[in-house]
């Protein structure tokens, strides 16, 4: 095994256990159904069972060495690699590095909150909780898989439980929202799938057939790979030339990596909800049940950004740099459009308001990725790394705060029977704890200094300013408008004279408080002392952006 792949310590398949633990929970739910156990027992059991992936992920995090490198690259750790389909070089290949581990941790901690938000489900409750476990397993598998065959399977399969959660337990327009969500993501993935067929044929033609994402990333970055002659760009160009296509299309390597870039970018931009590929998001987040909204916003949207960091930047750095201004422009439009979309929903649907703020926040992540690609080499490497650090921190902070906001929106609906902000007001006088907890989640989401969201946004703006100053300066509009929308939301709910809804309105129950308290504590802790999680991805971010020094020099 190469030096940049570090096997799982002691030979224990920790990552396989992590991925399979939710699936074993599904088996237990099925057993409970066969034995006709009460739904309440199943809800308690599933929520408790979700502590097992947290415990395994904690073991992985404790044993992870954030400074481990080889050949100037961050080492992939806890590696499990077994030949699977030898004929086409498909390996069962799992591993974690500084890009994936924070998102794995985010996934396992958000799943119990989604389960807690589902305790009010009365129809087909066992099926609902089984789908939550299935979705958790698919998302974990996506962040762990390092062979494109399994990466793509988990990417697509995550749509299935998400689709049924929206379709079966969503609101009035759930069928339209579920169908739109599924079709958008499926359609965007077609180009990605076809591209990797071409890449496989090109690498086979060069004598190194592979679907291995780490190997392909090293080829894209110009790093040595056994048996390889030249970079991935050269391999693709040689294959296209051998097919005779260069005679009609031209002998321009950038042309072919640009085609590859757009196939990758569109697939992941749809999931990240980059403008103009974002229109599925308000419908899906708004119509999904609360648990679906939590997992879609907190974790699934991050799958798009992770794909860009794992595949797009390492494999096609030349095209990423060339189209970085386009990515930056799309990010800016999404930032501003998302903020004004949230503002337009003041007095309307609270879930759609939160959904539009997610478009805004994911726009910052896209801006950071564009800035990391756009910067020239040399002294600007630090700024590129700062931008990627900010993007990863923003993903974690957004997941924690938005998940808490959707959970609290569900608690508000359970008390009022409505998702509308109109008619509310003055609830702070009768529910001070509710107001305090939602206030913390709101301020964390808008990036108040001292909270984790501020750290992510600060790093993004600091890193992006060096290469995309115009887009970064204009993106401040999004910061202001989103903060205004969230503050007005809080005002509409809790401030002013009490209305009719305030009569008999119950404050947060102990179970609801304990469900949200850990996330608010994490947001505060990471805002004051972000070093523990930033140490996980800082080395990986620094080495990722070094591609623009190696491959493009």
Image (cartoon, rainbow, N blue to C red):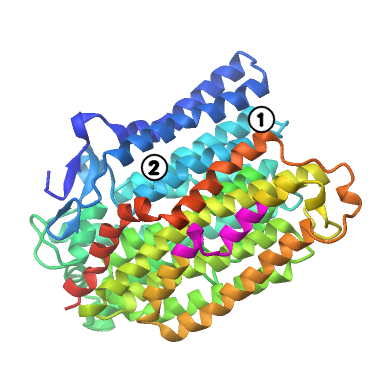
Quadrant of the rendering where the N terminus is positioned: top left
- Residue drawn at point x = 62 percent, y = 70 percent: 482
Circles 2, 1 touching at the beta carbon (< 8 Å): no
179 shown above or below 415:
below
- Residue drawn at point x = 35 percent, y = 56 percent: 534
User: Which x, y percent locates residue 484?
Assistant: 67, 71
User: Which x, y percent locates residue 176?
Assistant: 68, 55
Q: In the rendered image, which residue does mark 2 sit on?
A: 141
Name, please, the residue furthest toward the bottom. 470
Q: In the rendered image, which residue does mark 1 sit on?
A: 125
Front-most of residues 356 and 314: 356
Q: Which sits earlier in the primary sequence, circle 2 or circle 1?
A: 1
Residue 201 showing in the rendered view:
no
Quarter of the rendering containing residue 461: bottom left
Please tell me whether mark 1 sits on a helix, a strand or a loop: helix
137 shown above or below 435:
above
| Residues in magenta, as a range | 438-455
- Residue drawn at point x = 49 percent, y = 76 percent: 330
């Amino acid at each position: 095994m190469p030096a940049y792949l570090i096997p799982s310590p002691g030979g224990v398949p920790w990552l396989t256990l992590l991925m399979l633990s939710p699936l074993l929970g599904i088996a237990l739910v099925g057993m409970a159904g066969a034995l006709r156990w009460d739904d309440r027992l199943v809800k308690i059991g599933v929520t408790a069972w979700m502590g097992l992936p947290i415990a395994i992920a904690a073991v992985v995090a404790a044993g992870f060495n954030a400074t481990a490198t080889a050949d100037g690259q961050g080492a992939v750790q806890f590696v499990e690699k077994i030949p699977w389909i030898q004929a086409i070089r498909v390996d069962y290949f799992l591993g974690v590095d500084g890009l994936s581990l924070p998102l794995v941790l985010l996934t396992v901690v958000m799943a119990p909150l989604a389960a807690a938000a589902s305790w009010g489900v009365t129809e087909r409750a066992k099926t609902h909780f089984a789908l939550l476990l299935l979705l958790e397993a698919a998302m974990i598998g996506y962040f762990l898989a390092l062979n494109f065959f399994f990466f793509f399977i988990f990417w697509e399969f995550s749509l299935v439980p998400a689709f049924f959660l929206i379709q079966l337990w969503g609101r009035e327009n759930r069928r339209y929202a579920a169908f739109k969500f599924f079709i958008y993501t499926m359609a965007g993935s077609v180009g990605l799938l076809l591209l990797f067929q071409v890449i496989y044929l090109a690498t086979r033609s060069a004598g190194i057939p592979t679907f291995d994402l780490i190997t392909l990333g090293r080829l894209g970055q110009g790093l040595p790979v056994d048996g390889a002659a030249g970079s991935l760009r050269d391999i693709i160009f040689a294959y296209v030339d051998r097919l005779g296509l260069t005679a009609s299309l031209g002998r321009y390597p950038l042309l072919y990596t640009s085609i590859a870039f757009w196939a990758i970018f569109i697939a992941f931009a749809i999931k990240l909800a980059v403008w103009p590929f974002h229109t599925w998001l308000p419908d899906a987040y708004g119509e999904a049940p609360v648990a679906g909204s939590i997992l879609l916003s907190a974790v699934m949207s991050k799958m798009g950004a992770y794909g860009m960091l794992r595949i797009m930047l390492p494999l096609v750095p030349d095209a990423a740099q060339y189209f970085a201004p386009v990515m930056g422009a799309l990010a800016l439009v999404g930032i501003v459009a998302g903020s004004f979309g949230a503002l337009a929903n003041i007095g309307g649907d609270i879930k759609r308001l939160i959904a539009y703020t997610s478009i805004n926040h994911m726009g910052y992540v896209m801006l950071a990725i564009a800035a990391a690609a756009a910067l020239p080499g040399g002294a600007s490497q630090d700024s590129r790394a700062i931008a990627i650090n900010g993007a990863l921190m923003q993903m974690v902070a957004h997941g924690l705060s938005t998940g808490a906001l959707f959970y609290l929106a569900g608690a508000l609906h359970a008390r009022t029977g409505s998702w509308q902000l109109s008619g509310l007001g003055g609830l702070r006088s009768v529910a001070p704890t509710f107001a305090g907890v939602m206030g913390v989640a709101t301020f964390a989401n808008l990036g108040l200094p001292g909270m984790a969201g501020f750290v992510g946004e600060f790093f993004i703006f600091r890193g992006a300013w060096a290469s995309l100053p115009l887009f970064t300066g204009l993106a401040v509009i999004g910061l202001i408008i989103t903060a205004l929308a969230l503050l007005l939301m809080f005002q509409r709910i809790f401030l002013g004279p009490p209305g009719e809804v305030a009569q008999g309105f119950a404050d947060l129950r102990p179970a609801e408080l304990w469900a949200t308290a850990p996330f608010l504590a994490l947001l505060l802790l990471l805002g004051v002392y972000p070093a523990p999680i930033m140490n996980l991805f800082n080395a990986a971010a620094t080495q990722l952006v070094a591609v623009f020094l190696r491959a493009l020099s």
